């Protein structure tokens, strides 16, 4: 009888040990995945803003070509800058809020400037993502 109890305890110990290591491994992979998704998300946002700025300069060139008044050009520029600022704030807020309370300590940024600092620190990861290596 003691022998079967020992077998059961050894099995139980092995099972719990396996589950513990699996949990730790899964947690580590989840953290890496979240960090990668943050970098990729910020990269997508910055690429979108880059294209948005190209469209701004194209629109300004068209306005100047069509001899728009300086007042209209200034109004367009102010409107554009306001839109970009709102987009940045909303994008970062949405990204932070999407982590939920369980993973909120994994977010290392809280505004646009700190997000760009985070992206700069992880530029090698971003470069690997872009090049496909």
Image (cartoon, rainbow, N blue to C red):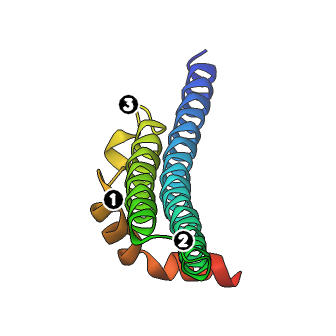
Q: Secondary structure at mark 3?
A: loop
Around disc 3, counting alpha carbons within 10 Å, would you say few (fewer than 14), some (14 to 19), or many (20 or more)?
A: few
Disc on res. 101 = 3
Q: Dot 2, crowdedness within 10 Å: few (<14), some or many (≥20)?
A: some
- Residue 38 vertical placement versus 46 (above, below): above
Q: Quadrant of the N terminus?
A: top right
Image quadrant where residue 103 sits: top left
Residue with the mark numbered 2: 56
Q: Is residue 60 above or below residue 40?
A: below
Alpha carbons under labels 1 and 3: distance apart: 21 Å
Residue 23 location (% of width, % of height): 53, 41
User: Residue 46: image x %, image y %?
Assistant: 51, 68
> Counting residues from the N terminus, which is met first, the one under dot 2 or under dot 1?
2
Query: Does residue 116 appear left or right of residue 16 in this picture?
Result: left
Q: How many marks?
A: 3
Q: Is residue 133 visible?
A: no
Where residue 65 is drawn, which disc sits there?
A: none
Foreground: disc 3 or disc 2? 2
The earlier-in-sequence mark between 1 and 3 is 3
Nearest the eye: 91 or 69:
69
Residue at image mark 1: 112
């Amino acid at each position: 009888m003691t022998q079967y109890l020992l077998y059961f305890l050894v099995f139980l110990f092995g099972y719990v040990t396996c589950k513990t290591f699996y949990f730790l491994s899964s947690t580590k992979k989840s953290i890496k995945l979240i960090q990668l998704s943050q970098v990729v998300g910020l990269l997508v946002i910055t690429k979108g803003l880059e294209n948005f700025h190209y469209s701004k300069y194209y629109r300004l060139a068209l306005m100047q070509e069509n001899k728009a008044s300086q007042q209209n050009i200034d109004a367009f520029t102010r409107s554009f800058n306001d839109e970009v600022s709102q987009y940045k704030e909303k994008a970062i807020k949405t990204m932070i809020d999407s982590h939920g309370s369980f993973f909120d300590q994994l977010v290392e940024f809280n505004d646009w400037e700190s997000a760009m600092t985070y992206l700069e620190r992880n530029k090698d990861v971003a470069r690997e993502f872009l090049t496909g290596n």
